Image (cartoon, coloured by chain):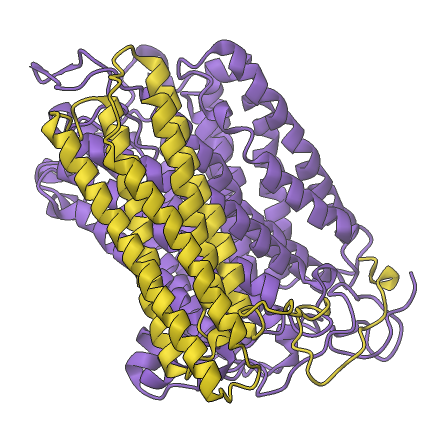
Chain colours: A purple, B yellow
Amino acid sequence: MHDVSAQPVAHQHSAPTGFIRKWVFSLDHKVIGKQYYALALVSVFIGMILSWFMRIHLAWPNWPIPLLDKLSAVGAPAGVMTPEYYLSLLTMHGTIMVFFVLTNAPFAAFGNYFLPIQIGAEDMAFPRFNMMSFWTTFVAWLVMMAAFFVADGPPISGWTAYAPLSAVGGDAGPGLAMGQNLWAISIAIFCIASLLGALNFISTTLDLRTKGMSLSRMPFCSWAWFITSIIALLAFAVLLPACILLILDRTAGTSFFIPAGLVLSDKLQPHSGGSPLLWQHLFWFFGHPEVYIAILPSIGIVATILPVFARKPLLGARAVVGSMIAIGFLSYMVWGHHMFVSGMNPFSADLFSVPTLIITIPATILTLLLLGTVYGAKMRFTSAALFCLGFISVFISGGISGFFLAQPSLDTILHATYFVVAHFHFVMAVASIFGVFAGTYFWFPKMTGRMMSEPLGKLHFWLTFIGVYAIFMPMHYLGLAGNIRRYSAFVDDFMIPLIPVHKFITIVALLTGAAQLIFLYNLIHSRFRGAIASENPWEATSLEWSTSSPPPFDNFGGRHLIVYNGPNEYGTDGPQDYIMQTSPEKAPVR
Amino acid sequence: MATTTLPPPPELTADDQGRGGTPKFTPRPGHVTASGSHAEKSETGVWVAVAAISMFFAAFTSSMIVRQGVSPDWLHFELPRVMYISTLVLLASSVTLELARRRFTAASDPVGSATAQDRSQVSKGMYWMYVTGGLGFLFVLGQLLAWRNLRAQGLYLATNPSSSFFYVFTGTHAIHLLGGICGVVYVLSRLRKTNGVARKSGFGAFSIYWHFMDILWVYLLLLLVFRF
């Protein structure tokens, strides 16, 4: 250990041999990437099981759910959850999925593993910060999980923790005492971890690119991780002070977010003058960029993988990078579109509506360029390629409902309904996860040295693809029919006829969730029994395919690679139809 | 991608470390710190951190402006006098930091085989580093006195939004400054380990951070003077 700490330069630390230094407190970006991936994998299954609980309750409100009373005897007496506990599960589902899955998997996990390799570096710029950011994330995760086990359970204020509900304390309902404290502390810790991570990504990209790796030769996912890290740096730097103010309101008696005259449980709250809207502004100033923190890495992953299997260069590569930059920039101007019905000045709604609609321009350019890449291609339909195509599909489906929601007059009607649930699950959650699946099938051979099973991968794709459409498409219909979101059961007259749709969605959700076990089996089985992978099984061009599978500790076995070409040289003439980035062969003029 | 329009592969030289073929970072004469690749990386890292910390305090600032405008309960109070003194102390610490840099520059030696004269320059520089850290520590003590002064006036964290923001601004800045004092300790220990080769000590990165803390405090003080 003292050897490592004495060497400030990343390149100089040697491969550790002890178990702890090698696999637990590792400085190796590849191990840290896998640690992030494992944490996201555990989290996604927890989040999915929570959604199962909620779906079963929505369709059959009186059914006892096995084991749920073990999780909380108060929240789910005899296995039937109370309306409040439904909200607790809703909060935890959202929080776990957004922070610990969608932020961690496409960005922190794959970015950590592949950003240094793709730019030809031997490690991140600050390996110790890198290790710290994972373990800080893990502490945040533990604190968040602890909320399940405190007396009145997790908070009921949603993943957005709207004040004053989140700020006033236990008088307002279950989970708002200790549970909400743990939530706020966990997110504050998560912010610090993400800031450290973003700092590392930016410094690595700027300083550690190998000879010849100009910015314009960086693979598209490296670009996406770079842009995402800038977004994350500025966004989490705002969520952290917001959490500090929230914690102070909750524990120190300040009144940043709590207005005067609140009476809860027959008690006048000892606060005055605070602004609940202030929390929403701070939160969504982070929250909207967070959407792009989740989706941009997946866009980058798809833009990298799609040409490999289309055997064609990505269409308009510079426009793809430009669109990603434009999306990142615009993400800071649109946060108010989450607040059209919040009581914000209605004139400011237009101000936020216009840039929101403008974002559709780079997003559409991106989508059309991805489609244009596929057009006329002799596709190799691997599992990774299928998930890339699936990504484009769900991204379009989710994006189109965004046009409607971006307009304040329509959003006023749709905002509190399942239409919004369908929209953000498609465009943020499913699309981002499809990018992660594509990345997993694509990079698994590099990460483990073994191939995943293609038949199982394709089965997994088709079940998931059909499943997510069967789950989320009907939700648009529910929303248009006025089905309010966040309710634990539908007893109002006008919602009772909609219950059969909910039953259908619940059944499909259970089946689609079960289909993920195929993925899990494939992942674990292939890790030990999969066919041995060659150095470059997909015939791809970027630097990670110029080293062994899995890469050695210093990534390139002491070689210093020199880059001669961009990452996009597919479909070329010659003995092979691609040119490696490290190949001195001159790319043809197109 | 239009890679074909890109310039041909860069000329290769044995000592070129990369950075994507951009011109190798050459230190200005007398620029002690940013020559080795480590110093370069740590300076990039600190600049990135400066951006994040700026956002952090920008968020507090806009919160304060919103909170002050939303309710008529803002209590104006006189800032404790000691804060002006501690501001001068912090400004002085930036000057002593530059004095340290001057010593290190005089002793700068690319090979690291320091002569006796260089050693004495380095130890003088280290002396100024101690002074810098000490002044930073004095500043934090000054903030403690300011908080005692507020407490004596009956202004606690939860008394009024103005006092809340006062403690939040000064407290979070003090935490960042304590991080800077840890930086002093780190740089001094590196200087000892590297036998006084300042450019390997992270001095450059540290000095960016310290001056930034100084500028940030002046900004916060002006904010407090004009809004409280």
In the displayed structure, does residue A573 sit left or right of residue B160? right
> Considering only vertical position in the picture, is B94 above or below B151?
below
Position of residue B100 measured from the top left corner of the image (x, y, whole percent)? 43, 65
Rendered view: A283 above or below A574: above
Q: Which part of the image, by quadrant, shows the C terminus of chain A?
A: bottom right
Left or right of A456: which side holds A174? left
Q: Is residue A105 left or right of residue A462?
A: left
Looking at the picture, tell me which residue is in the foreground, B4 or B23. B23
x and y percent of residue A171 in the render?
11, 24
For residue A506, what is the image quadrant?
top left
Where A357 falls versus A221 (above or below)? above
B45 or A482, which lies in front? B45
| Quadrant where the image shows the N terminus of chain A | bottom left
Residue depicted at x 39% and y 72%: B124
Let me know if residue A244 appears in the view.
no
Residue A153 rendering spot, x and y as whole percentages: 15, 40
Q: Is residue A497 left or right of residue A303?
A: left
Q: How many marks?
A: 0
Q: Is B175 located above or below residue A471 in the figure?
A: below
The answer to which of A482 and A365 lies nearer the viewer is A365
Nearer to me, A66 or A395:
A395
Name of the residue lying farthest toward the right: A589
Is residue B190 shown to the viewer in this render?
Answer: yes
For image coordinates 73% across by 60% down, the residue present is: A307
The quarter of the picture where residue A490 lies is top left
> Which residue does the image show at 52% across and 84% down from the upper left?
A552
Q: Position of residue A286 (x, y in %)?
A: 44, 37
The residue located at (36%, 22%) in the rendering is B227
